[in-house]
Image (cartoon, rainbow, N blue to C red):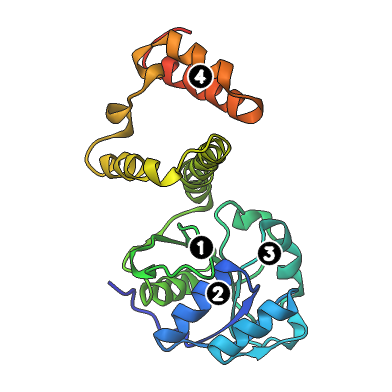
Amino acid sequence: MNLIVKNSIEKISIIGSGNVAWHLSTNFVKIGIKVTHIFGRNTIDVHSLCKKVNAIHSKSIKDLPKNQLVIICTPDDAISNICKSIDSSCPIAYTSGSVEIQSLPYREKIGVIYPLQTFSKNIKIKLNKVPFFIESTNNLLQKQLYNLTLKISNNVKIIDSIQRKKIHLAAVFVNNFTNHIIYQAQNYAKTNSINFKDLMPLLEETFNKINIESAFKSQTGPARRGDNNIIKQHIEILKGNSKEIYMLLSKSIKDTYNEKL
């Protein structure tokens, strides 16, 4: 349900030309929100995105229109300095999951549009199913950001910086660490003449089970069984980071189920 508010957002500027900027820009344009200007350090990517959404390629942040929402889609460590460079008349929203509003230079209108998803430019994502988390120190801007985001997603929530950071941390476990473990498996498969496609049904079932029961209940394998003989054999085979990860995770699984190494 939309929050009743005047002066809905119809035009936006974007800073950044990476994966998040690409997906937000293209999806906002699809539902009638005009992306008028885009600024970014990567000239080639900015030009491509401008062409895609029919926006103006701004050569400087100071060229962005005044009194218009600017969405910052950049790495976390760049957000603070960018905020300082944007005209004070412009409301700002940034897309970071971990940067607290209170840590940034004070502005009358600053907020967050945090999409809880991993993005790649060449992979289409249905944003209507992606959770978005909204925050602002300004009540009017918060309502405007909420209503704006509700146009591209059916799952929009208002939270504070502390809860957003906790969600981002959980997301690192779910996405970043999981992806890296799969990379380790892919690398092991490649060096041992194993077709990784043969592991895909197992991987798919692993994720399917999470929709049915908790990960705690669905845990299987030698560490869950306390099969030290198999664990020892595996450790002797592995080298480097893969070995360390295997040992650490095996210990964590055993500790979780009150087993001892």
Question: Can the viewer see residue 39?
Answer: no
Residue under pointer 3 = 106
Residue 133 drawn above or below residue 149: above
Of residues 218 and 85, the one drawn nearer to the viewer in this rendering: 218
Q: Residue at x 71, y 69 (%)?
A: 83
Q: Residues within 10 Å of mark 3 (few under 14, many from 20)?
A: few
Question: Can the viewer see residue 101?
Answer: yes
Q: State left or right for residue 93 relative to residue 133.
A: right
Disc 1 and disc 2 in contact, CB within 8 angstroms: yes
Amino acid, disc 4: His
Residue under pointer 4 = 234
Q: Locate residue 257: give its quadrant.
A: top left
Amino acid, disc 3: Tyr
Amino acid, disc 2: Trp
What is the CA distance from the residue labelled 2 to the residue labelled 4? 42 Å
Amino acid, disc 1: Phe
Identify the mark at residue 22; answer none if there is no mark.
2
Q: Secondary structure at mark 1?
A: loop
What is the CA distance from the residue labelled 3 to the residue labelled 2? 28 Å
Q: State left or right for residue 241 relative to residue 134.
A: right
Q: Residues within 10 Å of mark 4 (few under 14, many from 20)?
A: few
**Mark positioned earlier in the residue sequence (3 or 2):** 2
What is the CA distance from the residue labelled 1 to the residue labelled 2? 9 Å
Disc 1 and disc 4 in contact, CB within 8 angstroms: no
Q: Residues within 10 Å of mark 1 (few under 14, many from 20)?
A: some
Numbered disc in front, either 4 or 3? 4
Q: Locate residue 75: give its quadrant.
A: bottom right
Identify the mark at residue 119; answer none if there is no mark.
1
**Mark positioned earlier in the residue sequence (4 or 3):** 3
Q: Residue at x 48, y 47 (%)?
A: 175
